[in-house]
Amino acid sequence: QLQASGGGSVLVGGSLRLSCAASGRISVGWFRQASGKEREFVAAISWRDGSADYSDSVRGRFTISRDNAKNTVDLQMNSLKAEDTAVYYCATRYSASLSRRKDQYRDWGQGTLVTVSS
């Protein structure tokens, strides 16, 4: 079962690193859901070539990467803003292509809470 970890509380401008235990021929996506809002795409990485995609709201601040030694997919989050506050989920799909669509992902983790405050 997928499990996202690394969430916590941080001040505006701070950093956090999330991890998702995932390995093999799967592409991994990170999504987030703020209170009262729909779950939205954050970032994704392909298993085949490590290519990545980011939402406009996080591009340049977040970096998704695979750690093959640890069998994890990590999301490094820098310059955090209050609007990044959400429960973050990792999800996997058995395809090398990238997707922003929730329905394209098969397995979902339970999520980890990120709280950014001023």
Image (tube, rainbow, N blue to C red):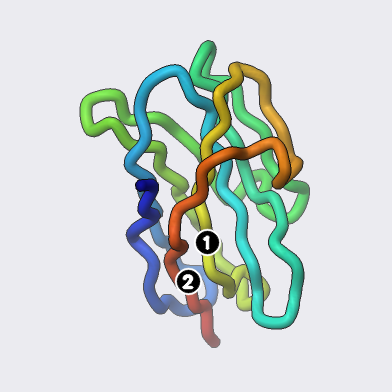
The residue beneath circle 2 is 114
Amino acid at dot 1: Tyr
Residue 70 lies left or right of residue 50; in this view the side is left
Amino acid at dot 2: Val
Quadrant housing residue 8: bottom left
Quadrant housing residue 45: top right
Circles 2 and 1: CB distance less than 8 Å?
A: yes
Residue 4 lies left or right of residue 55; in this view the side is left
The residue beneath circle 1 is 88
Give the residue at the far left of this rendering. 69
What residue is rendered at 37% in x and 35% in y? 22
Q: Nearer the viewer, residue 105 or 60?
A: 105
Q: Is residue 104 above or below residue 55?
A: above
Could you classify mark 2 by the number of other residues whose Cα lies within 10 Å: few (under 14), some (14-19), or many (20 or more)? many
Q: Residue 76: horizontal and vertical position, in percent?
A: 45, 49
Q: Residue 11: horizontal and vertical position, in percent?
A: 46, 79
Q: Residue 81: horizontal and vertical position, in percent?
A: 61, 71
Sequence-earlier tag: 2 or 1: 1
Q: Is residue 12 above or below residue 80?
A: below
SS for callout 2: strand
Could you classify mark 1 by the number of other residues whose Cα lies within 10 Å: few (under 14), some (14-19), or many (20 or more)? many
